[in-house]
Image (cartoon, helix red, strand yellow):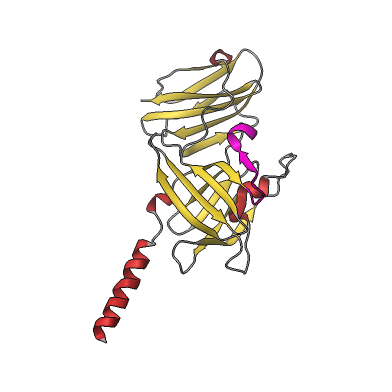
Amino acid sequence: MKNYFLILFLFIFNYSKAQDPDPNLFNQTWYLYEVNDTEGEHVFLENWYPDYAPYVIIDEFLNFNGLGLCNTFNGVLVQEPSLSNFRAISSDVTSNSCGDPFNYESLFIGPFGYVDSDPDFYTIINLQIANDTDGFQTLTYITQPFIGYLYRNTPILSVDQFDENIISFHPNPTKGKVYFSSDRGTLKSITILSISGKLIFQTFKNFSNSIDLSSLENGIYIAEIVHSEGKGVYKILKN
């Protein structure tokens, strides 16, 4: 009998250990790439929303924060007894109007914007992280009702590129400030990311034509610039 309980204990212990969440889930910026709703409709952000970069960040304490189309959100997840499912127990979402004709904002924020007393409703299930051949990772999960989500830990960089001569910036490499200018059109936003895709900072309206990287560690950074004539992605070396 003692051996039976010992075997049962080891089985439960090893099963629980195997079901621990992948540590790669935490403290990364996961950028939303694709949503697949219950009717089989696919929303590819790369094609539909090239000027936006919805994302979510989850820490090891299950606190989360993120950005939809134009609303920020934050809250806390709880881990279900299965050790593979998560759901929000608190959530705070801003109420900006995104001007989205398809009303996809709530869909993009997904289970991070819903708190329900039913542990089976809007629960994140079948969460998986895969290593990709390009050195980045893909995060996928489904929710109840059944909606599939696909994120990557790098932003969408290959959308709506335009003539690089529209925007100029200098110096590069830089020790601190980088100055941007454009001969036509207007700059709409500048996003600075680490080479791994982690969001450093973002500026939108009423920003100056320069950014200061002096507080950052030396290395390569990605500048994602949204312009009235398109979107460009550039590498900046801080030394």
Task: Tell me if residue 41 is in the magenta stretch.
Answer: yes
Magenta-drawn segment: 37-50
- Could you tell me which residue is drawn at 29 percent across and 73 percent down? 10
Q: Is residue 79 left or right of residue 41?
A: left
- Could you tell me which residue is drawn at 67 percent across and 49 percent down? 39
The answer to whether residue 210 is above or below residue 140 is above
Q: Is residue 205 left or right of residue 213?
A: right
**Residue farthest to the left?**
3
The answer to whether residue 105 is above or below residue 45 is below
The answer to whether residue 71 is above or below residue 170 is below
User: Is any atom of residue 29 visible in this view?
Assistant: yes
- Could you tell me which residue is drawn at 56 percent across and 61 percent down? 123
Task: Tell me if residue 69 is in the magenta stretch.
Answer: no
- In the image, 34 versus 31, the foreground residue is 34
The answer to whether residue 176 is above or below residue 145 is above
Position of the N terminus, as image quadrant, is: bottom left
User: Is any atom of residue 72 visible in this view?
Assistant: no
| Res 82 → quadrant | bottom left
Q: Position of residue 164 (x, y in %)?
A: 54, 16
- Could you tell me which residue is drawn at 35 percent across and 62 percent down? 18
Q: Position of residue 227 (x, y in %)?
A: 62, 23
**Residue farthest to the front?**
40
- In the image, 150 versus 174, the foreground residue is 150
